[in-house]
Image (cartoon, rainbow, N blue to C red):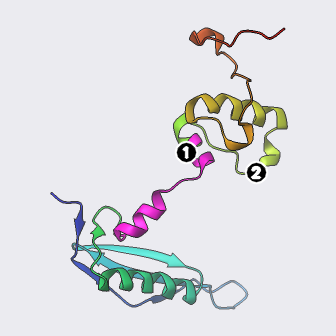
């Protein structure tokens, strides 16, 4: 079974209105882009109509240029590739099994430094630590050879 297809139908943007508020004002509007890939419907919601129309136009351009769409998430191959590119911190969080703190003030400065140093052995040294010779805590127990001490 292939995981890409050219069987794509893109629908117009649908306006979705929320419940009326208690003070009588109308509910918030949201704009939903809907498209079908290989018989499966995919919706994506946006706060403004311009965002929704922009995303829909990207889908239409990809379809008209003959690009294949992925069956898994319904995105064109080029958009799916761009979505899979991750920054270093997101990659680190996935490899190490913990999240990067969403608010930096929750984590003390020294803990941030230790976490970054410990992850350098897994994902390579980040650019701002290039040339540093510090090792992560617990490296001695892993049997890693340290460089000889300088006099």
**Quick one: 126 or 130, which is closer to the camera?**
130
What x and y, as percent, mark residue 84?
A: 46, 57
**Quick one: 9 or 69, which is closer to the camera?**
69
Q: Quadrant of residue 50?
A: bottom right
Q: Is residue 89 left or right of residue 63?
A: right
Asked if disc 2 and disc 1 are in contact, CB closer than 8 Å, the reply is: no
What x and y, as percent, mark residue 143?
A: 57, 9
Q: Report the residue at 60% width, 38% height from top.
A: 98
What predominant SS class does the magenta segment belong to? helix
The verdict on residue 75 being magenta is yes
Quadrant (top left, top right, bottom left, bottom right) of the C terminus: top right
Q: Report the residue at 39% width, 68% height from top.
A: 78
Q: Is residue 128 left or right of residue 7?
A: right
Circle 1 Cα neighbour tier, 10 Å, few/some/many (<14 / 14–19 / ≥20)? some
What x and y, as percent, mark residue 129?
A: 73, 37
Mark with earlier residue (2, 1): 1
Give the labeled residue for mark 1.
91
**Quick one: 148 or 28, which is closer to the camera?**
148
What x and y, as percent, mark residue 113?
A: 77, 34
Secondary structure under tag 1 reads helix
Find the distance from the CA under tag 2 to the CA under tag 1.
18 Å
Position of 135 relative to 55 (above/below): above
Q: Quadrant of residue 71?
A: bottom left
Q: Report the residue at 45% width, 75% height from top.
A: 44
Marks counted in the figure total 2
Q: Identify the magenta region.
A: 74-92
């Amino acid at each position: 079974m292939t995981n890409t297809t050219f069987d794509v139908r893109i629908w117009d943007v649908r306006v979705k209105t929320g419940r009326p508020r208690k003070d009588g004002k109308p509910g918030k509007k949201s704009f939903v882009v809907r498209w079908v890939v290989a018989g499966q419907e995919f919706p994506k919601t946006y706060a403004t109509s311009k965002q929704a129309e922009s995303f829909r136009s990207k889908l239409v351009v990809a379809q008209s240029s003959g690009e294949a769409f992925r069956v898994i998430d319904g995105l064109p191959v080029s958009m799916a590739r761009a979505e899979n590119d991750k920054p270093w911190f997101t990659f680190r969080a996935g490899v190490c099994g913990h999240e990067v703190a969403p608010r930096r003030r929750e984590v003390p400065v020294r803990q941030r430094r230790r976490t970054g140093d410990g992850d350098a052995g897994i994902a390579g040294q980040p650019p701002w630590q290039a040339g540093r010779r510090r090792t992560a805590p617990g490296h001695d127990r892993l049997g890693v050879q340290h460089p000889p001490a300088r006099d």
